[in-house]
Image (spheres, rainbow, N blue to C red):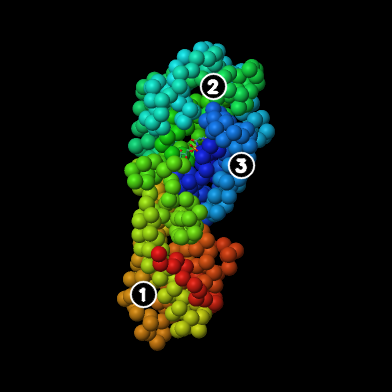
Amino acid sequence: MYITTPIYYVNDTPHVGHAYTTVIADALARWHRLHGEPARLITGTDEHGLKVQRTAEAAGIAPATLADRTAPRFRAAWDKLGIGYDDFVRTTESRHRLVVEELLSTVYERGYVRLGKYDGRYCVGCEAYVDSDVCTDHRRPTEHVTEENYFFRLSALAGELADWFARCPDAVHPASRRNEALGLLRQGLEDFSISRTSIDWGIPLPWDPAHVAYVWFDALGSYLTAAGGQWPAHHIIGKDILRFHTIYWPAILFAAGLEPPRRITVHGFLLARGEKISKSGLRGLPLDDLVAEFGVDGLRYHLLRDNPVGPDGDFSYEGIVARYNADLANTLGNLVARVCALVVSKCAGVGPAPTPGSPLAEVAAAAYADANAAWDEVQPAEALAAVWRLVAATNSYLVAAEPWKHPAPERVLGDALEALRIIALLASPAIPASAAEIRHRLGLSPSTVDDLTWGGYPGGLPVTKGEPLFPRR
Ligand code: MSP
């Protein structure tokens, strides 16, 4: 598995919107690793192009200085959010330049590049050639550009793209986003410009250094830079960059004689008060404040649980408080506290083993199967809902059995400990730090190789109480 996030522009600093994509990608990679499948996760920063150049100019600094300032802020944000990335690509690195030069040379030599004249409009916000006077995404006038450019012969690849969509019906998903991509294909594909002469903040074309590579050609190449020998990739992206990933990128790969992406998961926007969250719109919801208030796992859980992948979602302070209190503080947190306290008081702190025929065994198996099916479709919200069905069933099991009244509650508590062991595993992609803490309280060592079938809790381990895992907000 090779999973990627977009590489983020350094004209902006990390916000909840970027975090949404990155947390989905990280959780997906963790889900695979949970099954012993190695998963490589990469992210990075997109540092060239007109948008970055202009932001730097406005700040009175060189674009390289802006990039050097901002790239570490993305790294720091991802470190803070527990993102286990294996590589972080900056497009100004020389290893990346070499890859893009080779990609450019390959498509050039294979006859997919022609010289032409671009006479049309450009949206600097999108870094895209467009045909409207005003960009609907950025709500800003587009600019007129007349330049001699090299063009990528996208039109020559329409047939190959159509075959790929037909052959791989799951490659672009969810279905609504695949239909959007098919719509673009049906509209007809025009060659697009892959070079600029009017800017110099970019990678010069190997065969004509008076031109620099179009920033999107450069950026998409980062997925190859970081592949570490693994290809094809599973790209996680937002809907704003669907055209680049589902049409341009596979076509570039075909032109280079490489395999297209394995999968492209496209999610919608997170909105705050109806507006797309972006630098200007995010005031009041900085990542650091959210982490300080809800913990890393509180934020990760909310992003994954409340925003199904595909449609737009609302992000609000009220929303995160409600979800945090309901699922984490009141439900999972209480369950852990209750079970551990009972084992400490009733079993002298030694966790009993579960019973093979426990009614919870079936619920645990169903939770796992449902979560697995949901992760196959990259629907973390559904996967977590499945896991929380096991949390709820375990709570009900305790309420019905009333182990606190029982003189010998070993059976019931052993079952509850086993359910918690499985819950911690299944929830770990979303809430890795809390899952590790639950395991610790159950007396399991971090290195135990665990399986997801009922009966893995060995019994006889020291169970401990601790501070509330998720203090109420
Ligand atoms: N640099 C390009 C991507 C190149 S990938 C080869 C880019 N960068 S970006 O900084 O603008 O990031 C865009 C991505 O950030 C979106 O596709 C999405 O993944 C994420 N998001 C940014 N704001 C978002 C929301 N408000 N909501 C959801 N995702 C958002 O485009």
- Point out residue 137 in the picture as x, y percentages from the top left corner: 39, 32
- Tell me the crowding category of disc 3: few under 14, some 14 to 19, or many 20 or more residues within 10 angstroms, Cα based: few
Kindly tell me whether residue 86 is visible in this rendering: yes
Q: In 3D space, how far apart are the residues under numbered discs 2 and 1 (Cα atoms)?
A: 63 Å
Instruction: Depth check: give the residue in front, 149 or 135.
Output: 135
Q: Which amino acid type is marked by label 1?
A: Leu
The answer to whether marks 2 and 1 mark residues whose Cβ atoms lie closer than 8 Å is no
Image point 51% across, 12% down: which residue? 117
Ligand 1 within 8 A of label 1's CB?
A: no
First of labels 2, 1 by sequence position: 2
User: Along the horizontal axis of the image, is 374 left or right of 65?
Assistant: left
**In the current view of this chain or complex, which residue is farthest to the bottom?**
407
Q: In 3D space, how far apart are the residues under numbered discs 1 and 3 (Cα atoms)?
A: 53 Å
369 versus 216 height, above or below:
below
- Point out residue 237 in the picture as x, y percentages from the top left corner: 46, 39
Image point 36% across, 75% down: which residue? 398
Q: Secondary structure at mark 3?
A: helix
Labels 2, 1: front one: 2
Image point 41% across, 36% down: which residue? 239
Q: Secondary structure at mark 1?
A: helix
324 versus 133 height, above or below:
below
- Point out residue 423 in the picture as x, y percentages from the top left corner: 44, 63
| Mark 3 lies on residue | 69
Question: Looking at the figure, which quarter contains the N terminus?
Answer: top right
| Mark 2 lies on residue | 194
Which label is found at residue 398?
Answer: 1
Ligand 1 within 8 A of label 3's CB?
A: no
Q: Which amino acid type is marked by label 2?
A: Ile
